[in-house]
Amino acid sequence: MRRKLIIEVFGFFCLFIILASPILASNWQIKNVNTDNTGFSVITPVSVHRPDINYSGTHIDVTAPNDINLGVMTVGGPTYGSGICSVSTDADTWTVSVSDTATGYPGQMVATGSVYLTQQLQIGKTLPADHNASSGFNYNQSDGLNNLPFYVSQQVESSDSPGSYSITITFVGTY
Amino acid sequence: MKKAFLAIFLALILAVALAAPVFAGVTVYNGKIEETVSPGKTYTYTMTVQNSADSPADFGVEVDGYGTSANQDFVMLSPTNDTSPESARTMLTVTPTNFHLEANATQELTVTATIPPGTGAGGRYAIVFIHTIAASDQQVATVSAVAARVLLTVTGNTTDTSTQVTAVDPITAMNNNTAGVLVTVTDNGNYYVKPQVEATLMDGSKIIATGSVNTGWPIIPGYSRQYQVNFTGQGTIPAGKYQVDVTVKDAAGNLITSTTVPVQFSSKQVFQTTTTTSGTAPSASTITVVEKSGANINWTIIVVAVIGGVIVTILLVLVLQKRKTS
């Protein structure tokens, strides 16, 4: 009985480790940035030095936050979301421009066809997010490289039609 | 019953494993072209694009116009909006324009600049826009991208860096902000300018406060950029009329233009007592490769996961044993 128990414990433990290995072995670092009222915990990619790879030239890496699900948006108070942007570069001066670059209804969440929310999505690196997504904002070297906070908020008006809305935010780095 | 518990357990673990967020990341090496070129010649440049995410991704590449706006150091312009005579967009081609990359895989891009015969002297500017392609069912999808700036200087004798201060607007000190001015600089020439903007607040011939900004980013010919210059000085000044001397210098410190404009503050102004200068000039960088690696293991996560795994497993087995004995 005791031996069987030990075997079962060991078996389950091995199973747990094997199945959890994609998380453990990957280069994700769990960071709790729940310093605001959005209640989001996020996972941040970690960059490390790889001297065995010999690329040349100045470089910049831009890792946008993971896609954000705002859930069901209701009329009234804004719906919030957040994420983390990461930049890696050896350039002295860099900037990452964050905005909605769509030409159709820039800054606005769009449903199928020409249906869109009245208010623009608000984006920013602080709360409350206070930049229209059409014009956006910038990160630069004064913000640091990793764990760059990204916030969104969407206000829904009573005149807005029910539906499934979406938007694409582009993080463009340059140096 | 035991199989049901096992199935639930496996499903939970799989859900946790598969729920790890997928990040879209792109690394570009040699993502800036700054060269002197001659009319009638063709030049080839190579950039390397790497999928820095941990999952496969599709990429797209386009050539756009390059401009600046009041608040942006670079603006990508569609062909419709790229009307500048200093545009290099039509001189550039890039291959490939679409490709798929596995995690950490790389793709070389070939950028070809064909300078037509008779092209006049001065700068020609464009952006090679390299981006992931959004593939998301989430409400706010994100795209990682790099704007590889192309700054070509066509040889000749008529490089013109004429620059004009087109607006100076006072910033009233309020809350934690100091007084300052918003200076709008316009490049009227045919070559980019990396301006150093200096402003001096004067009361007659008396210097009250000074400030400067040097972002290191260029203004593209035909475009303007607005700079916030915060004043540094001692104490306060009462409301009233003053004047601001504004000078614009190039990256080498040579005076390009200057102007004096009256400003009026409607309330008492308080000045910072420390210098604030934003930005440094870009320069060539040494090769420092920063790369993601699966070898980077966070031991804290492992310890927590192992402890959690042990606890969960023991509890599960105890439950199973209890059910079996009962």
Image (cartoon, coloured by chain):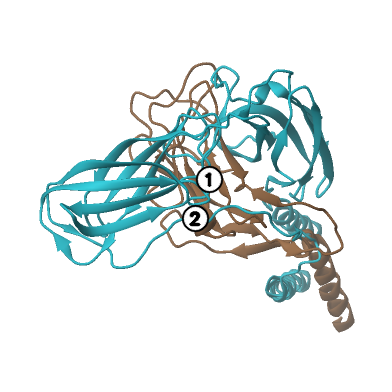
Chain colours: A brown, B cyan
Nearest the camera: B326 or A5?
A5
Q: In this view of the protein, can residue B167 be seen by the observer?
A: yes
Q: In this view of the protein, can residue B134 be seen by the observer?
A: no
Q: Residue at the spot x=58%, y=64% of the render?
A: A31
Residue furthest front as drawn = B157
Q: Amino acid at mark 1?
A: Trp
Q: Which residue is mark 2?
A: B279
Q: Amino acid at mark 2?
A: Gly
Q: Earlier in the sequence, mark 1 or mark 2?
A: 1
Label 1 close to label 2 by CB (< 8 Å): yes
Vertical side of A147 occupied by A122: above or below: above
Nearest the camera: A151 or B94?
B94
Task: Check disc 1: other Cα within 10 Å, few if <14, some if 14-19, many if 20+.
Answer: many
Cα separation, mark 1 vs mark 2, equals 9 Å
Nearest the camera: A103 or B22?
A103
Q: Which mark is residue B217?
A: 1
Q: Quadrant of the N terminus of chain A?
A: bottom right
Q: Residue A2, how many percent across, how many down?
A: 85, 83
- A77 displayed left or right of B37: left
Task: Check disc 2: other Cα within 10 Å, few if <14, some if 14-19, many if 20+.
Answer: some
